[in-house]
Image: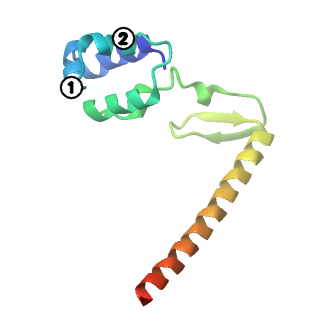
Amino acid sequence: MDGKTLKERLTRLTKLQMKIIAEKMDMSPQLLNQALNATDVKSGFVEHLCEVLNLSLSDLYDESTNNVSNVHNSNLTGVNVTGKDIHINPDAYNTLLKIVENNQKSTEKFQEQIDRLITLLEKK
């Protein structure tokens, strides 16, 4: 997200002046202004802002800038977390599905290894 958009949303959502936000972030207003002048604000900075200001990332990343829900390039459809229709390429879907399945298998193997290690430690 670019700094200008982030600054506008922060002002709209919190109704706070940038000086107050800088204080809450434990930084100078100049440093905050510098961070918000970036063309691509670092995600860690945005996460910290959300934490300090008690916002969720979804508050800042609304559908007007996160246009994943507006992608229409295939006949495969679904609903994203905002409830909007999405259309994705079937090849991309199949690739993602394989990745998720592999990650699930790896997680299951790791859990089995952890369980075995715990059993061994409990025997000692």
Q: In the rendered image, which quarter is residue 51 located in?
A: top left
* Mark earlier in primary sequence (1, 2): 1
Q: Residue at x 77, y 47 (%)?
A: 94
Q: Residue furthest right?
A: 91
Q: Residues within 10 Å of mark 2 (few under 14, many from 20)?
A: few
Element class at badge 2: helix
Mark 1 secondary-structure assignment = helix
Left or right of residue 71, residue 28 in this image: left
The spot of residue 83 in percent (x, y) is 53, 38
Left or right, 64 with respect to 98, comes to left
Q: Residue furthest front?
A: 124
Above or below 62: residue 34:
above
The percent coordinates of residue 59 (x first, y second) are 38, 29
Q: Which mark is residue 112?
A: none
Rate crowding at label 1 as few (under 14), some (14 to 19) or many (20 or more) other CA atoms within 10 Å: few
Residue in front for this viewpoint, 70 or 57: 57
Q: List the residue tagged with mark 1.
A: 24
The amino acid type, in three-letter code, at marker 1 is Lys
- In this picture, is 22 found above or below 101? above
User: Viewer-nearest of labels 1 and 2?
Assistant: 2
Name the residue at 77% across, 36% down: 89
Give 97 or 52, whichever is nearer the viewer: 52
Q: How many marks?
A: 2
**Dot 2 amino acid type:** Gln
Q: CA distance from mark 1 to mark 2?
A: 16 Å
**Spot occupied by residue 97 in the image (x, y as percentages of width and height):** 71, 51
Name the residue tied to disc 2. 34
- Point out residue 5 in the picture as x, y percentages from the top left corner: 43, 14
User: Considering depth in this image, is 79 or 105 the residue closer to the camera?
Assistant: 105
